[in-house]
Image: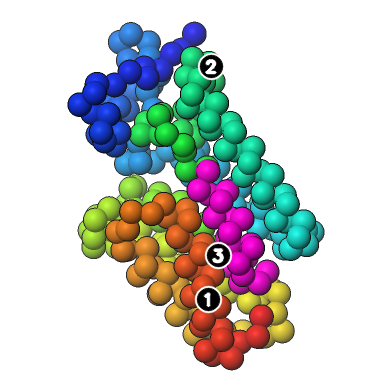
């Protein structure tokens, strides 16, 4: 059975991000499973991220009411938190599922909660705080812009414009945000395609992309949907768009 090495030295325990596991192959010489880091493509994790966000946003769009969605996401968030606590506190049990979870868990998340926890919390906070169409833009942006910018940046990024940011990745973030907002505005409001709608989507994409370039020590799964929704609400109010 594949096992993962959960041991670490006292010296390195102060900064778990320093524990970088070599990802050149799937196995170590001793048969220990190796996990990816944030610098790897980890396509399955990105697709999992995108699929969850799109599915939940679409469910909110076409079926669930505001109250139903709060209860639904709240239940999911509680379930994820409990599962994560079991995984962290019972590593022997968690190691049995490494052949599956290694596709969505990073090396630096071995001894702490994975990004699934702030992801679920961010969805819940966004839905609670903002009107439905505003929240939908924030959720779709989180689902699309964040993973696509990472994939493009890691695979094709050649021009660095900041710490852990490339021009190519930021452009992917910009267009993902732009089309997410445009999709919501054109499909679920009374506005036809026009300068006002285009301007609002452009301003939102620009503001959110610039915000994403700021290096802050808060999980971007939380900051992206909340900032996007707030910025979109502010832009719509300023331009007189009623959504």
Indicate the position of residue 124 as horizontal and vertical percent values: 61, 55
How far is mark 3 from mark 1, CA to CA? 8 Å
Mark 2 or mark 3, which is nearer the start of the sequence? 2
Viewer-proximal residue, 241 or 23?
241
Secondary structure beneath disc 1? helix
Q: Residue, x 72% and y 49% (percent of image)?
A: 72
Mark 2 or mark 1, which is nearer the start of the sequence? 2
Indicate the position of residue 3 as horizontal and vertical percent values: 43, 13
| Cβ–Cβ under 8 Å for marks 3 and 2 | no
Image quadrant in which the C terminus is located: bottom right
Label 3: which residue?
A: 138
Q: Residue, x 63% and y 77% (percent of image)?
A: 185
What residue span does the magenta drawing correspond to? 117-140
Q: Is residue 174 magenta?
A: no
Q: Main secondary structure of the magenta part?
A: helix
Label 2: which residue?
A: 93
Q: Nearer the viewer, mark 1 or mark 2?
A: 2
**Is residue 27 toward the left or the right of residue 145 in the image?**
left
Query: Residue 232 — which label?
Result: 1
Q: Residue, x 41% and y 17% (percent of image)?
A: 4
Indicate the position of residue 207 as horizontal and vertical percent values: 40, 74
Question: Alpha-carbon neighbours of circle 1 within 10 Å: few (<14), some, or many (≥20)?
Answer: many
Q: Is residue 136 magenta?
A: yes
């Amino acid at each position: 059975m594949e096992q993962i090495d959960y041991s670490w030295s006292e010296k390195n325990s102060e900064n778990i991000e320093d524990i970088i596991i070599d990802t050149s192959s799937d196995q170590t010489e001793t048969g220990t499973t190796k996990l990816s880091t944030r610098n790897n493509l980890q396509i399955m994790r990105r697709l999992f991220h995108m699929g969850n966000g799109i599915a939940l946003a679409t469910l909110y769009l076409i079926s669930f009411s505001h109250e139903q969605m709060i209860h639904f996401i709240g239940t999911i968030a509680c379930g994820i938190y409990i599962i994560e606590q079991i995984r962290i506190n019972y590593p022997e049990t968690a190691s049995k599922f490494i052949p599956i979870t290694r596709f969505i868990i990073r090396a630096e998340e071995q001894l702490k909660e994975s990004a699934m926890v702030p992801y679920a919390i961010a969805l819940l906070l966004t839905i609670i705080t903002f009107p439905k169409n505003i929240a939908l833009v924030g959720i779709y942006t989180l689902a699309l812009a964040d993973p696509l910018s990472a994939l493009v940046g890691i695979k094709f990024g050649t021009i660095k414009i900041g710490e852990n940011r490339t021009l190519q990745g930021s452009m992917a973030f910009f267009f993902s945000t732009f089309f997410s907002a445009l999709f919501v505005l054109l499909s679920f409001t009374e506005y036809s395609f026009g300068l006002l709608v285009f301007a609002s989507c452009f301003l939102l994409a620009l503001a959110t992309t610039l915000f994403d370039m700021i290096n802050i020590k808060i999980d971007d799964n939380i900051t992206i949907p909340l900032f996007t929704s707030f910025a979109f609400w502010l832009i719509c109010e300023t331009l007189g768009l009623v959504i």
